[in-house]
Image (tube, rainbow, N blue to C red):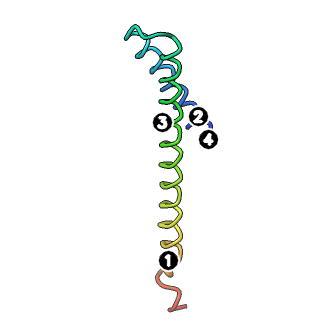
Amino acid sequence: MNKIILNIGLLIFCFSIVFFSQREMPIVEVITKSFIVFISSTVILSVTAIVLLKLIQKTESSTNENSDHTILGSKAHE
């Protein structure tokens, strides 16, 4: 998961370099702004992934606790 987030962040970094360099900014300013965009997008993606994983684990654990049924019926009838 971390590699995917890092690769997406690097892709955004490359796109932002192209975007800011087309604005005819100095190269130091282009790299600085692109790095800021890279860091912020990577942090946002990481937090989003953590929240989604926690949400999935929460729903998965609640469905496992409530599954008292087998294929033929509930376990209470056995």
Residue depth check, mark 3 versus mark 1: number of the one nearer the observer: 3
Residue depth check, mark 3 versus mark 4: number of the one nearer the observer: 3
What numbered label is drawn on residue 2? 4
Residue depth check, mark 2 versus mark 1: number of the one nearer the observer: 2
Residue depth check, mark 4 versus mark 1: number of the one nearer the observer: 4
Q: Nearer the viewer, residue 68 or 41?
A: 41
Identify the residue at horizontal 53%, vertical 86% (top origin).
75
How crowded pointer 2 is (Cα within 10 Å; few <14, some 14-19, many 20+) is rated as some
Callout 3: SS = helix
Pointer 1 residue: 67
**At label 2, which amino acid type do we have?**
Leu
Callout 1: SS = loop
**At label 3, which amino acid type do we have?**
Ser
Residue 32 place in picture, x, y as percent: 52, 22
**At label 1, which amino acid type do we have?**
Ser
The answer for how far apart the CA atoms under marks 4 and 2 are is 6 Å
The answer for how far apart the CA atoms under marks 3 and 4 are is 13 Å
Identify the residue at horizontal 48%, vertical 16% (top origin).
30
What numbered label is drawn on residue 6? 2
Residue 29 place in picture, x, y as percent: 49, 17
Q: Are marks 3 and 1 in contact (CB under 8 Å)?
A: no
Q: Nearer the viewer, residue 14 or 22?
A: 22
What numbered label is drawn on residue 41? 3
Q: Are marks 4 and 2 in contact (CB under 8 Å)?
A: yes
